[in-house]
Image (spheres, helix red, strand yellow):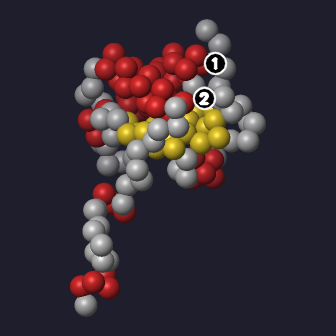
Amino acid sequence: MTCTYATMTKRADFVAANAGLRVARPGFVLLAKANGGQGMRAGITVTKKIGNAVVRNRMKRRFRALLRELLPEHGLVDTDHVLIGRENGVERDFTLLRGELLAALERAQAGKGDPPRNHRGRKRGPGGGKAAKR
């Protein structure tokens, strides 16, 4: 089976995709952003917080297999897709991850994203910054 999407390699493309639609799932976060007619592209990011190199590489292999299977048929046209691995994504059943990616792609297709996360996951209420503590 031939891939109908290109692989993203440049950091600038990943940073640009971060400004797009964000769909969070237990095993990963999907970022989707229109790329202005450059075709369907995909990238994978797994940080060192996830585990050692063996664990990170296993997660990337699983994500590549998912993208190869689902993106040509269910991906968004002229869009950059970035999968960001989450801690419990390695242990998740592959069929469960597949279903989550399908649901995430459907949400992205509908334009329904999740709200952006605050810095390092901290929730700040009204006046919750440094100025409020003085």
Q: In which quarter of the image is the N terminus?
A: top right
Mark 2 neighbour density, 10 Å: few (under 14) some (14–19) many (20 or more): many
Q: In which quarter of the image is the C terminus?
A: bottom left
Residue ID for mark 2? 76
Does residue 77 sit above or below 84 in this rendering? above
Answer with mark 1 or mark 2, whichever residue precedes in sequence. 1
Q: What residue type is labelled 1?
A: Cys
Distance (Cα) linking label 1 and label 2: 14 Å
| Contact? badges 1 and 2 (CB < 8 Å) | no
Q: Which of marks 1 and 2 is in front?
A: 2
Residue at position x 28%, y 40% in the image: 87
Q: Can the viewer see residue 104 in this picture?
A: yes
Tell me if 48 is positioned left or right of 9 in this view: left
Mark 1 neighbour density, 10 Å: few (under 14) some (14–19) many (20 or more): few
Does residue 70 sit above or below 27 in this rendering? above
Horizontal and vertical percent position of residue 80: 61, 38
Tell me if 134 is positioned left or right of 14 in this view: left
Residue at position x 73%, y 41% in the image: 36
Q: Is mark 2 on a helix, strand or loop?
A: loop
Horizontal and vertical percent position of residue 127: 30, 77
Residue ID for mark 1? 3
Q: Which amino acid does label 2 sit on?
A: Leu
Q: Is mark 1 on a helix, strand or loop?
A: loop
Residue lying furthest right in this view? 37
Does residue 28 sit above or below 69 in this rendering? below
Horizontal and vertical percent position of residue 39: 71, 31
Tell me if 101 is positioned left or right of 68 in this view: left
Residue at position x 75%, y 36% in the image: 37
